[in-house]
Image (tube, rainbow, N blue to C red):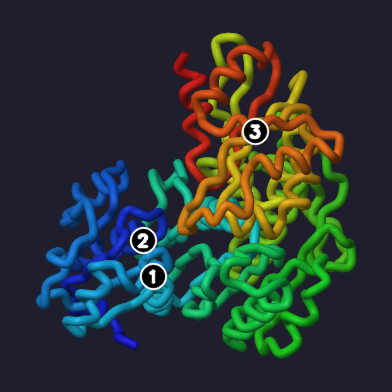
């Protein structure tokens, strides 16, 4: 594998530079005086920001963008082998790194690298870790898979040995990382277009866990049935967290305020400790916060900074994000949830938020996920008073007409739910305007572009 010499900045090219994770790595290299070039399929605020920082970015991916003077190329799983830029880079024999390989090399420059993994909750938990490290004046470098207000984007370049990043399991990309502290929030069936099933996913997390060095720490959800399998051969210290009192870190006396923000008593090895108050919503974020407290205790962060950081941390963009109230009094939230477990957690949090009727506009994400988890999606969404379904967001996939949102509508209604497949965004907006009433709560939900609907409604 090509090794980047961070002491000798050179010319790097990013295929798909406008992506949330790729743009962050590009910004780190720009801050380190690398010459950064790249391409994306469309203009965006991220692309414009990178240009302002000095990057050269092409719109459209064509052979001519790749030249022999490029020192190395970075690409993501979304780039196919017949992509014209990919083909030309191969033809020229340019060194090529995956996004995860570059992230791993960047992480190796930091003594205290923290990698936050798990099927769900990575962005929110990375946000919690970031707020704590900032509250403790640790000046961390941060790479997060969402837009975080406290750092003004998705990347922050610090000047100390602290580095915190999300660690994604898709295509086993997190196997390229060598963190000092590894966090595993949860393990669930997802990305079934890549993994063969839950056993394959568990094995992937096992490999990730075993990469934690012997002097480091693995923080893992102890409520899972897979914990013992994942940790069997881990040589580092292992700390468990979860709601079960047998975990090293757990919570008791959980209460919620009128906005669904929890407060709880921290319990460490069976002993009650401080009260913890969160501005992230829902019981799932109580669990997420326990992992950050365990990690930060190990790193020697004072509890007062941990508590202050957690209290200051509201959800990242598109994580139970309050968008506003429409002219006719409907509260609009937006959430990135695109897996049944995430949907259940989000709807459970919504029930702690004052409202009359609960509406969910759901945009399924990828055909493979919708097909594999159809019944689970239906069960999760049937808890809502009203579900309005958009067409499936294809992402990297092609529609083979084996599954559609109409199938999900039928499954939800069979379970006693109230679902309507309206398909396009304009039809959904018109239906909401006619049927949502004052003090109703409406959540736009999904990993695609469904949040546009809420923005349009708020402008009317």
Earlier in the chain: of badge 1 and badge 3, it is 1
Marking on residue 421 = 3
The span from disc 3 to disc 2 (Cα, nearest Å) is 34 Å
Element under label 2?
A: helix
Q: Nearer the viewer, residue 128 or 430?
A: 430
Q: Residue at 56% of width from left, 40% of height from top?
A: 391
The quadrant holding residue 325 is: top right
Earlier in the chain: of badge 3 and badge 2, it is 2
Q: Residue at 33% of width from left, 77% of height from top?
A: 97
The quadrant holding residue 188 is: bottom right
Residue 229 visible in the snapshot: yes
The span from disc 1 to disc 2 (Cα, nearest Å) is 7 Å
Relative to 329, say whether 366 is above or below: below
Image x and y of residue 151, in percent: 41, 47
* Residue topped by disc 1: 99
Q: Nearer the viewer, residue 21 or 448?
A: 448
The answer to whether the residue labelled 1 contacts the one labelled 2, judged by CB atoms less than 8 Å apart, is yes
Image label count: 3
68 on left or right of 132: left
Image x and y of residue 425, in percent: 51, 29
Indicate which label's residue lies in the foreground, 3 or 2: 3
Image x and y of residue 118, in percent: 64, 64
The quadrant holding residue 431 is: top right
Q: Residues within 10 Å of mark 1 (few under 14, many from 20)?
A: many
The answer to whether the residue labelled 1 contacts the one labelled 3, judged by CB atoms less than 8 Å apart, is no
Q: Residue at 29% of width from left, 64% of height from top?
A: 15
Relative to 194, say whether 151 is above or below: above
Q: Residues within 10 Å of mark 2 (few under 14, many from 20)?
A: many
37 on left or right of 439: left
Marking on residue 22 = 2
Indicate which label's residue lies in the foreground, 1 or 3: 3
């Amino acid at each position: 594998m090509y090794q980047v010499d961070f002491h000798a900045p050179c010319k790097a090219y990013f295929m798909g530079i406008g992506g949330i994770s790729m743009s962050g790595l590009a910004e780190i290299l720009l801050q380190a005086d690398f010459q950064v070039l790249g391409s994306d399929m469309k203009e965006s605020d991220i692309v414009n920001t990178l240009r302002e920082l000095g990057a050269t970015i092409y719109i459209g991916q064509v052979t001519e963008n790749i030249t022999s003077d490029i020192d190395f190329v970075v690409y993501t799983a979304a780039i196919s082998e017949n992509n014209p830029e990919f083909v030309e880079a191969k033809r020229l024999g340019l060194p090529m790194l995956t996004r995860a390989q570059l992230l791993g090399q960047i992480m190796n420059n930091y003594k205290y690298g923290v990698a936050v993994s798990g099927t769900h909750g990575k962005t929110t938990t990375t946000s919690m870790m970031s707020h704590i490290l900032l509250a403790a004046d640790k000046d961390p470098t941060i790479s997060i898979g969402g837009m975080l207000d406290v750092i003004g984007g998705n990347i922050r370049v610090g000047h100390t040995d602290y580095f915190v990043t999300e660690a994604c399991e898709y295509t086993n990309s997190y196997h390229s990382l060598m963190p000092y502290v590894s966090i595993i929030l949860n393990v669930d069936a997802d990305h079934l277009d890549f993994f063969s099933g839950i056993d394959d996913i568990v094995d992937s997390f096992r490999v990730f866990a075993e990469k934690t060095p012997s002097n480091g720490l693995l923080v893992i959800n102890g409520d899972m049935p897979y914990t013992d399998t994942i940790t069997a051969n881990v040589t580092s210290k292992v700390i468990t967290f979860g709601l079960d009192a047998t975990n090293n870190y757990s919570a008791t006396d959980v209460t919620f305020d009128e906005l669904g923000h929890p407060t709880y008593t921290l319990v460490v090895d069976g002993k009650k400790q401080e009260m913890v108050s969160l501005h992230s919503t829902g019981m799932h974020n109580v669990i997420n916060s326990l992992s950050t407290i365990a990690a930060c205790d190990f790193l020697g962060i004072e509890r007062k900074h941990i508590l202050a950081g957690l209290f200051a941390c509201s959800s990242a963009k598109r994580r139970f994000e309050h968008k506003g109230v429409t002219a006719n009094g409907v509260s609009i939230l937006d959430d990135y949830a695109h897996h049944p477990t995430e949907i259940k957690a989000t709807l459970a949090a919504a029930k702690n938020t004052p409202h009359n009727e609960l509406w969910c506009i759901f945009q399924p994400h990828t055909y493979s996920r919708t097909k594999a988890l159809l019944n689970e999606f239906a069960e999760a969404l049937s808890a809502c008073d009203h579900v309005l379904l958009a067409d499936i967001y294809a992402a990297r996939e092609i529609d083979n007409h084996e599954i559609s949102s109409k199938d999900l509508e039928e499954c939800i209604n069979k379970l006693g739910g109230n679902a309507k497949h309206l398909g396009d965004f304009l039809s959904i907006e018109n239906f909401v305007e006619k049927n949502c009433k004052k003090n109703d709560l409406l959540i736009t939900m999904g990993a695609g572009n469904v949040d546009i609907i809420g923005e349009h409604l708020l402008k009317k």
